[in-house]
Image: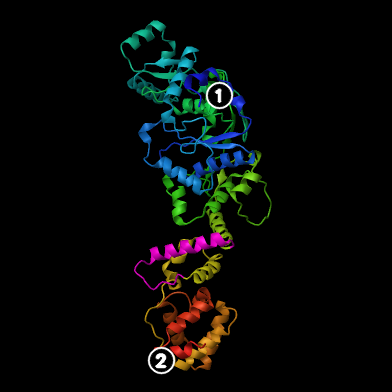
């Protein structure tokens, strides 16, 4: 890795040394990954993969007061769960680390010295009390609060005197009236003269930690970032960043700003909603491919095919088909119903692969054990679970839905129940009738059961009550015919045989 002083002597080296695309996802560990963050990471990753580039993870922890313990580790785990592969970053190697900003303070100090020396920055000795008075006065006169740039005009003698007294100071960057043009990859030409609305911004705080804007520019340059894709809320700040690049004499990367993700009703997503965190979706039982296809369906970036059948694309397929010029420039509405459809589609696809099918079975087994910890008589046979999964693909959204109380009969086998409302011969006749029935479909089973009750001169409600108890041990729940359809022929016959009085079991085995 280049030494700190060499980095600044070779200021043009890195940008021109990278012929390949290099993008980064740079979250702050002040909370957990949510849909907006996942969308930003995903679009950077897809852009890099589409062009054969590198995806970097950088942890921006300069605001030490808001750090959440374990947030960085959880964030990395969520990214990997979603199929986003990190090429460089903390714990992943790379030639341009450290990839954690709090470990790069010496680098930022060198960069600040360069700005002080070339006259692009200055020391600001204003107290918090003075800044607060400026804010209050601006609000009183109904103006936008901004720093008045007072310390920009201090003489060298005044600065020396303040330093000799040990007066605390921060470093501010001199904004210029010149507007650096921004050609946004998504929004096109963007005009914004930052000096019209802001005073000189702080780039190094009094605690010697850099601000977001400063560290962001320095790190992107030194890590050779060629393209910056981030949320549109940062677009106004980008013109400020371009002025910093100019002050250093660096070539800036290309910028693209992703539109807001919004709820179905057009309202802005908020972390306070509590249901947009990636952990929320994982705990609910949504699968990763379903979630990332859901995110890209709202934001664009892919060829639109009218009336096309809903598809579930792999991460590789998404990378191959992604085009930055197709990303929407208008707010991206999320449709929760689509996520449910995609999750059902992913369950269906996973059932089609031998390895993924086995993993589904294991997941269901664990979910059932967690849902019914006090029951030892659970039906967790692989064939039974697969039958249930095949039945559920068009009916249920999540694997967890299979453990609802209404479907407890799928897993909890009746124990020590004997069918005594039917004679031995009637039970045998019923088993034969059901065994000869090829299509175990609710409507046809209902007809068959009614016909059987008439033939055997049984009261239909009484017979159905007895069968429900034999199949599920429940007094209420789905209709008996529907229950039989869900359980499937093999399990239905098995449970009815287990409910036969002991003296007729041997005879029933021959059915």
Q: Which residue of the protein is positioned furthest toward the top in this rendering?
A: 157
Relative image position of residue 122 (x, y in whole percent): 44, 15
Kind of element beneath mark 1: helix
Please tell me which residue is depicted at 49% across the width and 49% down the height of the picture. Answer: 81
Q: Nearer the viewer, residue 399 or 332?
A: 399
Q: Residue at x 45, y 35 (%)?
A: 59
**Up-down: is 247 above or below 101?**
above
Residue 150 seen from this side: no
Q: Residues within 10 Å of mark 1 (few under 14, many from 20)?
A: some
Residue 422 rendering spot, x and y as whole percentages? 44, 90
Residue 374's quadrant in the figure? bottom left
Element at label 2: helix
Q: Which residue is mark 1?
A: 242
Tag in front: 1 or 2: 2
Which is nearer the eye, 344 or 498?
Answer: 498
Closer to the chain start, of discs 1 and 2, is: 1
| Residue that extends furthest to the front in the rendered view of this protein | 1
The main secondary structure of the magenta stretch is helix
- Where is 278 relative to 63, above or below? below
* Image: 366 above or below 151: below
- Quadrant hosting residue 70: top left
What mark, if any, has residue 503 been given in the picture?
A: 2
Q: Would residue 369 be counted in the magenta stretch?
A: yes
Q: Is residue 500 left or right of residue 248?
A: left
Above-or-below relation of 113 to 342: above
Relative to the observer, which residue lies in front, 472 or 97? 97
Whole-percent x and y of residue 371? 39, 64
Residue 393 forms part of the magenta stretch: no
Residue found at the far right of this picture: 306
Q: Which residues are magenta?
A: 352-380
């Amino acid at each position: 890795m280049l030494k700190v002083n060499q980095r600044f002597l070779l200021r043009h080296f890195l940008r021109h040394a990278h012929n390949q695309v290099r993008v980064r996802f740079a979250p702050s560990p002040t909370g957990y990954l949510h849909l907006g963050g996942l969308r930003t990471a995903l679009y950077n990753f897809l852009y890099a993969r589409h062009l054969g580039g590198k995806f970097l993870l950088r942890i921006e922890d300069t605001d030490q007061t808001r750090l959440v313990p374990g947030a960085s580790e959880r964030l990395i785990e969520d990214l990997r769960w979603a199929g986003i592969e990190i090429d460089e970053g903390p714990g992943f190697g790379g030639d341009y680390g450290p990839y954690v900003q709090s470990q790069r303070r010496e680098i930022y100090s060198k960069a600040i010295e360069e700005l002080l020396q070339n006259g692009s920055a200055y020391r600001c000795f204003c107290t918090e009390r003075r800044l607060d008075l400026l804010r209050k006065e601006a609000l009183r006169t109904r103006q936008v609060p901004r720093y008045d740039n007072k310390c920009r005009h201090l003489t060298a003698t005044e600065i020396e005197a303040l330093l000799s007294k040990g007066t605390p100071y921060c470093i501010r960057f001199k904004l210029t009236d010149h507007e650096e043009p921004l050609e946004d990859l998504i929004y096109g030409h963007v005009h914004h003269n930052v000096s019209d609305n802001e005073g000189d911004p702080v780039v190094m705080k009094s605690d010697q930690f850099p601000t977001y804007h400063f560290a962001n520019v320095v790190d992107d340059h030194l890590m050779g970032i060629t393209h910056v894709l981030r949320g549109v809320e940062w677009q106004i700040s980008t013109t400020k960043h371009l002025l910093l690049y100019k002050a250093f004499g660096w070539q800036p990367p290309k910028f693209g700003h992703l539109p807001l993700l919004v709820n179905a009703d057009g309202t802005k997503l908020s972390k306070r909603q509590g249901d947009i965190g990636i952990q929320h979706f994982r705990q609910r039982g949504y699968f990763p491919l379903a979630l990332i296809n859901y995110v890209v369906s709202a934001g664009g970036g892919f060829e639109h095919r009218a009336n096309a059948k809903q598809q579930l694309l792999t991460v590789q397929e998404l990378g191959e088909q992604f085009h930055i010029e197709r990303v929407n420039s208008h707010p991206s509405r999320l449709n929760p119903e689509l996520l449910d459809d995609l999750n059902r589609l992913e369950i269906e696809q996973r059932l089609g692969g031998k390895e993924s099918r086995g993993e589904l079975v294991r997941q269901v087994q664990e979910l059932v054990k967690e849902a019914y910890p006090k029951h030892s008589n659970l039906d967790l046979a692989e064939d039974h679970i697969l039958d249930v999964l095949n039945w559920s693909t068009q009916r249920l959204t999540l694997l967890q839905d299979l453990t609802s109380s209404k479907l407890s009969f799928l897993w909890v086998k009746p124990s020590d129940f004997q069918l005594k409302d039917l004679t031995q011969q009637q039970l045998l006749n019923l088993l034969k009738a059901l065994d000869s029935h090829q299509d175990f479909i609710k409507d046809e089973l209902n007809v068959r059961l009614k016909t059987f009750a008439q033939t055997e001169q049984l009261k239909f409600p009484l017979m159905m009550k007895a069968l429900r108890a034999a199949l599920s041990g429940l007094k209420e729940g789905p209709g008996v015919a529907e229950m039989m359809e869900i359980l499937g022929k093999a399990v239905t016959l098995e449970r009815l045989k287990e409910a036969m009085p002991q003296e007729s079991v041997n005879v029933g085995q021959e059915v």
